[in-house]
Image (spheres, rainbow, N blue to C red):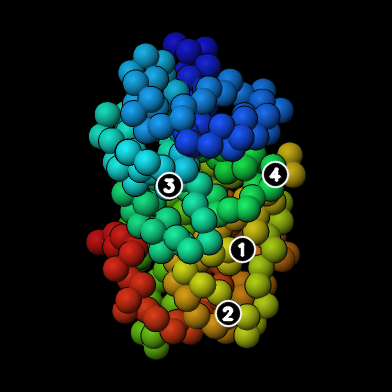
C-alpha cells in the first residue's frame, strides 16, 4: 500500500491546450524523477483521471471548453486527495486566489522558472501524501493547533492574516504550507516600508535540498514590522507557524474588499 501511495503521488498530469507548454513542463518535472502525462483539454484530463490515479494535476486556467476553474471544481469533487496547481497569467491574480478558495493547492504565475515549478510540485506531492495519511489513519489536527488557527483569514493551506485590535494585519504561513515545504533553512523577508500585494510573493522560503517556495500575501499593504527572530532561527516557521513563526505585520490598504477572497476559520 505504501509503495502504491508513493507511485501515485509521483504521477503528474499536465493540462494545457498548447502542446509546447505541456512538453516544457514535462521536461522540467522529469528531472525530479516524476512520471508525467499530458492532456490537451479539460475533458481529456477528466477521462485520464478516471483511468489512472494521479497525485498532482497542473492545469492552465484559460482553456477552451472546460476551463481551469471548472476543472479544479470537478477534480476536487471526484478526487479530493489530488493536489491541483493552476498556471495563470499576470492579469488573473485575483482569480488565482479565488481558485485556491475552491480547492486548488497553489498557483504558478507566468512566466515561471524551472525551480519555481519544481518547488511547488514537490510541495503538492507532499500535500497529497499528507491527505492519504490523514484519511487512512483518521488523523486530526491537535486541538491546540486548531485553536491557534482560528480567527484568521486564509489563502487555504498557504498563508493567514490576523486582524489585530489596531487594524494592523499580522501575516504568517499556515501549518500545511510549512509541512509540505519541509525543514525551512532560510526566509527572504521583505523590508519595512515595502508594499506587498494580495496573491503575490511576500516571503521566499528555502527548505532542505535548496528547494525554493513562495508564500503569497493574503492582503495588500505596507510592511511596518518584520519578524527579525526568523533571521536568527528560521525553524520557528516550522515549529510555531501561528505564533512565534509569524512573518510580517502590514498596514492594509484594501482590506474590506480583499477579505471576500479569503476563508475565515471560525
Residue at figure coordinates x 46%, y 27% from the top left: 39
Q: Residue 183 appears at what percent x and percent y?
A: 64, 44
Q: CA distance from mark 2 to mark 1?
A: 12 Å
Q: Tell me: residue 76, above or below residue 178.
A: above
Q: Which mark is residue 58?
A: none
Q: Counting residues from the N terminus, which is met first, the one under dot 2 or under dot 3?
A: 3
Query: What residue is pinned by disc 1?
Result: 203
Instruction: Work out whether residue 125 can be spotted.
Output: no
Mark 3, secondary structure of its residue? loop
Instruction: Classify 10 Å Cα crowding around label 1: few (below 14), some (14-19), many (20 and above).
Output: many
Query: What residue is pinned by disc 2?
Result: 195
Q: Nearer the viewer, mark 2 or mark 1?
A: 2
Query: What residue is pinned by disc 4?
Result: 115
Query: What residue is pinned by disc 3?
Result: 61
Q: Tell me: residue 111, above or below residue 153.
A: above
- Nearest the viewer among 180 and 112 is 112
Q: Residue 219 appears at what percent x and percent y?
A: 44, 72
Report the side of 194 relative to 135 (left or right): right
In the orientation shown, which residue stands out farthest toward the bottom? 166
Q: CA distance from mark 4 to mark 1?
A: 16 Å
Mark 1, secondary structure of its residue? strand
Q: Counting residues from the N terminus, which is met first, the one under dot 4 or under dot 3?
A: 3
Mark 2, secondary structure of its residue? strand
Residue at figure coordinates x 62%, y 75% from the top left: 226
Residue at figure coordinates x 54%, y 50% from the top left: 108
Q: CA distance from mark 2 to mark 3?
A: 27 Å
Q: Counting residues from the N terminus, which is met first, the one under dot 2 or under dot 4?
A: 4
Residue at figure coordinates x 41%, y 32% from the top left: 41
Instruction: Classify 10 Å Cα crowding around label 4: few (below 14), some (14-19), many (20 and above).
Output: some
Instruction: Classify 10 Å Cα crowding around label 2: few (below 14), some (14-19), many (20 and above).
Output: some
Q: Residue 232 appears at what percent x and percent y?
A: 73, 64
Instruction: Classify 10 Å Cα crowding around label 3: few (below 14), some (14-19), many (20 and above).
Output: many
Amino acid at each position: 500500500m505504501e509503495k502504491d501511495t508513493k507511485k501515485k503521488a509521483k504521477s503528474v498530469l499536465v493540462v494545457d491546450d498548447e502542446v509546447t507548454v505541456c512538453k516544457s513542463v514535462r521536461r522540467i518535472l522529469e528531472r525530479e524523477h516524476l512520471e508525467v502525462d499530458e492532456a490537451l483539454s479539460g475533458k481529456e484530463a477528466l477521462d485520464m483521471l478516471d483511468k489512472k490515479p494521479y497525485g498532482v494535476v497542473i492545469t492552465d486556467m484559460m482553456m477552451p471548453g472546460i476551463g481551469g476553474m471548472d476543472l479544479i471544481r470537478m477534480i476536487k469533487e471526484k478526487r479530493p486527495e489530488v493536489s491541483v496547481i493552476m498556471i495563470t497569467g499576470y492579469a488573473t491574480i485575483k482569480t488565482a486566489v479565488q481558485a485556491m478558495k475552491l480547492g486548488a493547492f497553489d498557483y504558478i504565475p507566468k512566466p515561471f522558472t524551472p525551480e519555481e515549478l519544481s518547488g511547488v510540485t514537490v510541495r503538492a506531492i507532499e500535500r497529497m501524501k499528507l491527505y492519504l495519511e490523514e484519511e487512512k489513519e483518521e488523523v486530526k489536527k491537535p486541538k491546540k493547533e486548531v485553536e491557534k488557527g482560528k480567527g484568521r483569514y486564509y489563502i487555504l493551506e498557504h498563508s493567514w492574516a490576523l486582524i489585530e485590535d489596531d487594524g494592523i494585519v499580522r501575516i504568517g504561513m499556515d501549518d500545511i504550507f510549512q509541512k509540505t515545504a519541509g525543514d525551512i533553512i532560510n526566509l527572504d523577508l521583505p523590508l519595512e516600508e515595502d508594499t506587498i500585494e494580495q496573491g503575490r510573493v511576500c516571503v521566499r522560503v528555502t527548505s532542505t535540498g535548496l528547494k525554493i517556495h513562495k508564500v503569497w500575501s493574503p492582503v495588500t499593504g505596507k510592511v511596518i514590522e518584520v519578524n527579525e527572530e526568523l533571521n536568527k532561527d528560521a525553524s520557528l516557521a516550522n515549529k510555531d507557524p501561528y505564533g512565534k513563526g509569524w512573518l510580517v505585520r502590514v498596514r492594509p490598504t484594501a482590506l474590506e474588499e480583499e477579505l471576500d477572497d479569503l476563508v475565515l476559520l471560525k
